[in-house]
Image (cartoon, rainbow, N blue to C red):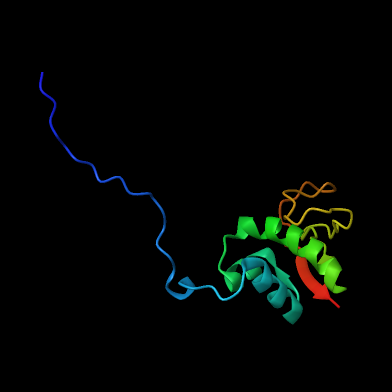
Amino acid sequence: MQRSSVSYNLLPMHKPAAAGSAARETTVRESLHHALLEGAATARDLSKLVGIPEHDVASHLEHVERSLSHKGETLVVDPAACLDCGFEFTRRHRFTRPSACPNCRGRRISFPRFRVVR
C-alpha cells in the first residue's frame, strides 16, 4: 500500500486582530484603571470600553484592585441586587454577578458596578 504525499499547511488557529486593536498603547489593566477613574461601570461596560471578553474582566479587576493600593486609590464595588425582592449582595467579595438571589431564588440580578476613588 502506497501513501500519498499530501502536504497539510498547519497554521496556528487564532482570531484575526480587530480593526482598532492592531497596536495597543496601554495594557488592559491600565485601560481598565482609566475607565474606572471616569466613573462607575459594570463588567459589560468595561469589556466594551477596553475590548476584552466580559468573563475576563473579573480576573483583571482583582489585579487592578491590588495595584491601586500602591497609588493611594481604592476600588469601590456597588453591590449587585435582586431586581425581584431588592436583596443586595453586600457581603459578596467576588467581582462576578451572582446567579440567584438567596431570599427569593430569583435570577433577575443587576450587575455590580465598579469605580475607583482617590
Residue 66 picture location, percent across and down:
81, 61
Q: How many marks?
A: 0
Residue 116 drawn above or below residue 89: below
User: Looking at the figure, which quarter contains the C terminus?
Assistant: bottom right
Residue 55 picture location, percent across and down:
62, 55
Is residue 110 among what the camera can see? no
Residue 15 drawn above or below residue 46: above
Q: In this image, 77 relative to 49: left or right?
A: right
Question: Within the image, what quadrant is residue 112 found in?
Answer: bottom right
Is residue 13 among what the camera can see? yes
Residue at 78% of width from left, 46% of height from top? Answer: 105
User: Looking at the figure, which quarter contains the N terminus?
Assistant: top left
Residue 37 drawn above or below residue 53: below
Residue at 82% of width from left, 65% of height from top? Answer: 77
Extreme residue toward the left, this view? 2
Q: Nearer the viewer, residue 42 or 37?
A: 37
Residue 87 picture location, percent across and down:
85, 57
Extreme residue toward the bottom, this view? 38
Residue 12 picture location, percent across and down:
37, 49
Residue at 40% of width from left, 62% of height from top? Answer: 16
Q: In this image, 31 relative to 7: left or right?
A: right
Q: Nearer the viewer, residue 76 or 21?
A: 21
Residue 4 drawn above or below residue 83: above
Extreme residue toward the top, this view? 1
Q: Nearer the viewer, residue 44 or 29?
A: 29
